[in-house]
Image: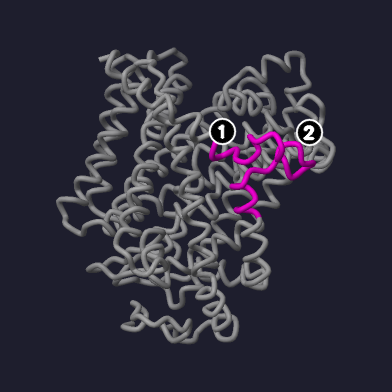
Amino acid sequence: MQQIFEAINNFFKFVTPVSDFFWDFPTNLSWYANIPILGDFSLAIILLVGSGIYFSIRTGFIQLTHFKRGINLLTQKKKEETGISSLAAFFLSSAMRVGPGNILGVTGAIAVGGPGAIFWMWVSAFFGMATAYVEAVLAQIFKEKKEDEFIGGLPFYGQKLLGNKAWAGIGLSVMYIVYAMCCLPAQGFNVVSSIGQMAEILTGTTISTTSLFYYVVAALIILATAVVVFKGIKRVTEVTDKMVPVMAVVYIVTVLLLVFVNFKSIPLFFASVFGGAFTPQAIFGGAFGTVLAQGVKRGLMSNEAGQGTITMAAGAASCDHPCDQGIVQSIGVFLDTMVICTLTGFVVVMAHLWTGSDPEGWFAMDRLPKFLTSAAELTPGRALNPVVMFLLTLCFCLFAYTCLLGMISFSEIVANRISTKKSFLNGIRILGLFIATFGILCSMAGLDLGNLWAISDLGNILIVFANIPLLYLGANYVFKATKQYKKDANSRFSSKTIDYAEELYWDKK
C-alpha cells in the first residue's frame, strides 16, 4: 500500500513548481523583481486587489453604503419554497470561507511577513468585499431553477458570458471539481486529527494515529458526511446553519476573553500591526514588499473574494433582487477577514513569542502549533490551558468539517453544468467521499502526499485567472443592476434591467 501512495506522490512532483510559477509570476523574472515595490507583487495579487479597487469605485463603495441593508437582509426570516434563504446562503458560503486557513493562513502570514501583514490583510479584504459583491450578483443574475432548488455560480455565469458555449461551462466545472477534490484529503484529516487532539485533552493521554480510535472516528465522519451530502444542498444548509454560528461564536468569545485578560497588550498589537505595515522588523525579512504581499495573499486566499469558489452559495439563494445577495456575500468577506482573521492575529501578535526566550524554536513550529502555543501563552494559569486548547481545537475541527461539506456540495452544484443525471451527481458525491477517506488514511499512516495536495494551490490560481476576466465581461450587467438597486431596492429585476438579450430566470418570476 505504501508503494502505491509513494507512486501517486511521485507522479505529481511536477505540480508544486508549476503552481509556484503561476502564483509568483512575474516576480520570478529578475527584471520585474528588481522594480521597487511593484517587483514584490505577483500578477494574481495585482489582479485581485486592482479589481477590488475598480469595483469599489464603480459601485460607489457599495460594501460601505449598503452594509446596514445587508445586516437587515440577514435578520429577515423568510420561508423559501425554492432555493435557500439569504441567511442560509451566507452560512453556506461562510462554511467555506471560515476554514482552517483563518488560523493557519494568518499565523503563516505573520510568521513570514510580521504583524504588519494583518494591516494589508484588512486593506485587501475591504476592496475584496466589492469583488465578492460583483461575483455574487453575477451568480444571481444567471442562476437557474432545478426542481425546488437554484443552481448557479462560476460555471453558470461563465458559460453565459462566453457566448453560452457548453465547453466553457464544462471546463469551469471540471476546474472547480479538480480543485475541490484535491482540497478534500487535507480537510478530512484536519477533522479527524482535531477530534483526536480533543480526546487527548479530555483523557490526558496520547492516542496513536494508527489506533482503533482514529479508524472509528474516520468511519463515523465519512458516514455522517455521506448522510448529509446525499440529501442535497438544502440538507447541507441545515447543517451549516447550525455549525457556522456555533463555531464563529465559540471562536470569537474564546479569543475575546484571551484579549480581555491581556488587555495591557492591546496597544502592542496595534503598534506592531500599523508599525510593521510600513516599517517591518528585520526578523521578518525587513522588506516592505514581503509584508504587503503576505497580507494581501493570505487575506484573499482566506476570504476567497475574486476566486469564484464561493459563488455557488450565492447562486443557490432565493432573494428579491440579485444585488441583495451581493451585499450579503460581501458581509461574508467582512466576517471572515475583519473579524475571524483579526482575532487570530490578536492571539499570535499579543503573545509575542518571536521575541521570547526561544524565537527560533517558535519559527520552526508548524502553523497550528504556533497558534496554539501563542494561545497558551495568553491563557492565565495552567489550569485553564486545557479548556482554551479544547475550545480552539473544536473550532478548528468545525472550520475543517464545514469546508469538507461545502467542497462536496459545491462540486455537486457545478456538476449540473456537465450533466443533471442523478447517477452522475451521485458519482461526484461518492468521488468526494472516497478522496476524503483516501486522504485521511494516508495522513493517519504518516504518509506525506504534499505533491498531490499542491494541486489545490494550482487549481486556486487557475480559477483566479479564469474568474477575474469573467467578472470584467459581466461587470456592466452588475453596474446596471446596481444602478436600479440604488434607485429602488424593491424594484422588479429582469433581463431588461441590464439590457440582456436572452431570457433569464428573473423574467419568469
Q: Nearer the viewer, residue 36 or 246?
A: 36
In the image, residue 462 lies at what x, y percent? 47, 46
**Image depth: mark 2 or mark 1 in front:** 2
Secondary structure, magenta segment, majority class: helix
Magenta span includes 247: no
SS state under label 1: helix
The quadrant where residue 367 appears: top right
Dot 1, crowdedness within 10 Å: few (<14), some or many (≥20)? many
Q: Can residue 339 be seen?
A: no
> Relative to residue 245, is residue 222 drawn left or right?
left
Give the residue furthest to the front: 31
| Vertical relation: 268 (above or below) 71 | above
Residue occupying image coordinates x 62% and y 59%: 51
Residue range in magenta is 21-49
The image shows residue 193, relative to residue 467, as above or below, that is: above
> Which disc is residue 104 wearing?
1
Q: Amino acid at mark 2?
A: Ala
| Residue located at (38% from left, 36% from top) | 182
Q: Which residue is mark 2?
A: 287
- At 28% across and 59% down in the image, what residue appears? 417
Please state if 373 lies on the left or on the right of 225 as rendered. Answer: right
